[in-house]
Amino acid sequence: MIEKIKTVFRIPELRQRILFTLGIIAVFRLGSHVPLPGVDVDVLGAAIDNLQQGMQGFLGLFDLFAGGNFKKATVFAIGIMPYISASIILQLLGSVIPYFQKLQKEGEEGRKKITQLTRYATVVIATMQAWGIGIFLSSMEASIGGATAKVVPDGGVGFMALTVITLVTGTIFLMWLGEQITDRGIGNGISLIIMIGILVRLPQVIFKEIHYVQNDVHTIFTEILLVGILIAVVAGVILLTQGTRKIPVQYAKRVVGRKVYGGQSTHIPMRINTAGVMPIIFAQAILMLPGMVGTYFSESPWVGTMLRLFDFNHPFYLTVFGLFIVFFTYFYTAIAFNPVEVADNMKKQGGFIPGIRPGKRTAEYIDNILTRVTLPGAIALALIAVFPSIIVNFLNVDYDVASFFGGTSLLIMVGVALDTLQQVESHLLMRHYDGFMKSGKIRGRRRM
C-alpha cells in the first residue's frame, strides 16, 4: 500500500489534483472556525441543550450535514444543503415539465443552463433558511451563571440582515469550493465536503466512548460488539455499493472492407445500487423541511407535535424516511439509467441480448431486470439508513456514536470514499500503473 501511495504522487497531474483537493478541504475547515457575527456561542450551546427532544433531533440532523457548523454558529452554519435541495427540485421538475426535459436533452448547453438555474435556486433557498436561522437564534436564551443571557445580545434588523448575507455567502462559497474540487481536484466536490464535515466528528465520538468505558457506562464487551457491528455494516455497505447484475450482450460480426468488426461477447453491468448515496441525501433534505418550518414557529404547540413525529428515533419518521429512500432510489435510477437509450445504442452497434429481439423487447427486458434488481437494493439502503436508531434503542448508545454504524453518515463516507478511490484508480491505470487493488475488486477498474 505504501508503494501504491508513492506511485500516486509520481504522476504530476494526479499529484496536483490531490494537493488541490486537500487545499480546498483546508479552506473549508478554516471557515468552519469563523463565528457568525453577533452570536454568543457559549449561550447557544447551553440553549440547544435545553431544547425539547424533537427540536434537538432536528438540529442534530441539520448539524450533521452542516459539518458541525450550526451548533458552533459559523459562517458555514447552513452548509451545502440548499444546493442539494435546489438540485432535487430541478431534477424533479425535469421529469414533469417539458422545458426542463428539453434542457436535459440539449447536451452541454442544457447542462450549463440547468447549473445556472440550480445556483439561482440555491440562493433563494439559502436566503429562506438563513432568515429562519436568524429568527431562531434571536429567540433563544439560556441561564449562564444564574443569570439569563440571550444568544444574540444585540438583535434587530441589523443582525438579521448581516446574518442572511453572511450565511448565504457562506453557502455560495461552499458551492464554489465543491465545483472547484469536481473540476480541478479528485472526487465529487459536494459529496467530499459533506463527508469531511461528518468525519471531523469522529475524534469526538472516540473520546466519548473512552469516557463511557472509564465511567462504567459501557463495558468492554459492549465496545467489542460495537466494533464488530461496525465492520459488518461497512462490509454490507461496500457489497451493496459494488454489487452488480451482469446482462450478457453479443455483438454480430460486420465486414467493413478487409476488416471484421464485432463478434465479441460482453455484458451490461446492472448495479444493485445505481443511485448511490443520493436517495439518502434527497430523503433527508425533504424530511428536514418540517424542522425548518419549526424554526419560524417554535412556540406553536402544533409545531411541537410535528417535531416530535419527525424526531429521528420516532417510528413515524423512520417509516416515512424508509419509504422516501425507496422512492428516490427508483427515481434517481430512472434518471441515471435509461433502458430505451441503452437498447437503441446496442441496436445501432449490432449488439443484442441472446434470446431477446433488439429494440423495444430489449428495452423492456432491461427495464424488467432493472426494476427487480433495484427493489432489494432500495430496501437494503433503507434498512441501513434507519440502523442507527435501532442501535440507539437496543444498545443504549449515543446517537453521535450510532451515526457511524449506519445511516446517512456511513453511506456517504463509504460511497464517497469508493468513488474517489475509483477516480484515483482510473488515473493510475491510464498510465499503466497497478491500482490499489490487484484483484480488481473496485468496480469501474479496467486492465490496460
Image (tube, rainbow, N blue to C red):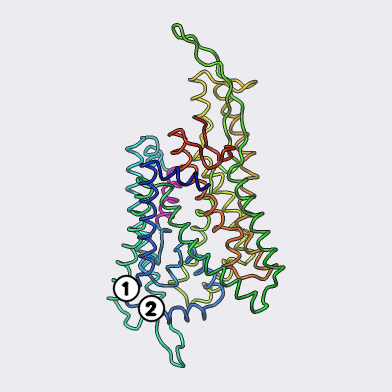
The kind of residue on which mark 1 rests is Met
Q: Residue furthest bottom?
A: 146
Residue 118 location, x and y as percent? 36, 50
Label ID, residue 138: 2
Q: Nearer the viewer, residue 106 or 245?
A: 245
> Going 49% across and 39% down the picture, which residue do you hit?
336
> Considering only order in the chain, which callout, 2 or 1, is on the residue closer to the N terminus?
2
Q: Nearer the viewer, residue 68 or 339?
A: 68
> What is the residue that sits farthest to the right in this orientation?
221
136 vs 78: above or below: below
Residue topped by disc 1: 160
Q: Are marks 1 and 2 in contact (CB under 8 Å)?
A: yes
Left or right of 310 in this view: 432: left
Task: From the viewer's perspective, tell me whether residue 119 is left or right of residue 367.
Answer: left
Nearest the viewer among 309 and 386 is 386
Q: Is residue 92 magenta?
A: yes
Q: Main secondary structure of the magenta part?
A: helix
Q: CA distance from mark 1 to mark 2?
A: 9 Å
Say which amino acid is labelled 2. Ser
